[in-house]
Image (spheres, rainbow, N blue to C red):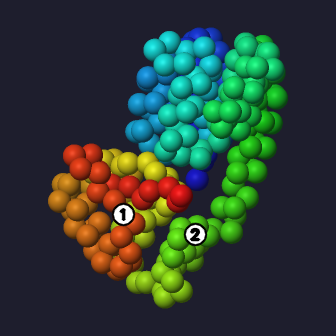
Amino acid sequence: MDKKILIIEDEAAIQKILTEPLTFAGYKVTAASDGLEGINAFHKQPFDLVLLDIMLPKIDGYTVCELIRQESQIPIILLTALDSEDAQIKGFDKLADDYITKPFSIRLVLKRVEALLRRTSSDILSDTIRYKEITLCESERQVTVSGKELSLTHLEFELLLLFLKNKGRVFTRDELLNLVWGYDFAGDEKGVNFHIMNLRKKLNVDYIETVRGVGYRIAKEN
């Protein structure tokens, strides 16, 4: 599956400079023009990496980085004309993964993106995700809880996989319908509730939280 990259950059020319070569390199690119639009885009679908400008309208890049980090460990590369050491340290304090100053070489950006995705996916190569008593092997589509293997339906497995890959992120029922069932699914939110209920029963551990009035999530580990 193609890697998905979110570019949050207010300058249209730089958006284009980044989008075209990244798309040509095989990435699926979504662009946002300010911090608020970027956060909204981030919540609409899962991404594999974020290219984030610091000097943004509405919400600055540091704050966007901080907000994303409250929900996800997705790789974040800061792009900025601020080249001082203090600016870079502040970015890393916000838990950004890398920092590229403007003007930049697009070849450098491509290499940094490639390297960061390779590095952060090293754990994924084993196809195993562990969360407390739960162990999920994606390639073998196997789930165990405290060493006991579970028999999950396709939808139950995909729901659990989505939650475990995005620990801390709250998914609305509409988002779950779109991401797990697909846009062409002719169902309703009651179907989501039913499958969540069955998944909880099979796991027999109370890790899938209901966020009242919003949706569901699996919380980050402490």
Towards the viewer: 126 or 167: 167
Q: Are marks 1 and 2 in contact (CB under 8 Å)?
A: no
Q: Is residue 100 left or right of residue 221?
A: right
Horizontally, residue 42 falls left or right of residue 101, namely left
- Which amino acid lies under the numbered mark 1 shown in the image of this protein? Ile
Residue located 60% across and 14% down the image: 55
Q: Quadrant of residue 66?
A: top right
- The residue that disc 2 covers is 130
Classify 10 Å Cα crowding around label 2: few (below 14), some (14-19), many (20 and above).
few
* Residue on which the image places disc 1: 208
Residue 182 position within the rendered picture, expressed as x and y whole percent measured from the top left: 35, 53
Mark 1: few, some, or many residues within 10 Å (few <14, many ≥20)? some
- Closer to the chain start, of discs 1 and 2, is 2
Q: State the SS at label 1.
A: strand
Front-most of residues 63 and 154: 63
Above or below, 19 relative to 26: above
Secondary structure at badge 2 equals: strand
Amino acid type, mark 2: Arg
Q: Which residue is outermost to the front? A: 222
Residue 23: horizontal and vertical position, in percent? 63, 33
| Cα distance in 3D space between marks 1 and 2 | 15 Å
Q: Is residue 159 left or right of residue 197?
A: right
Picture residue at 66% right of the left edge, 61% below the top = 124
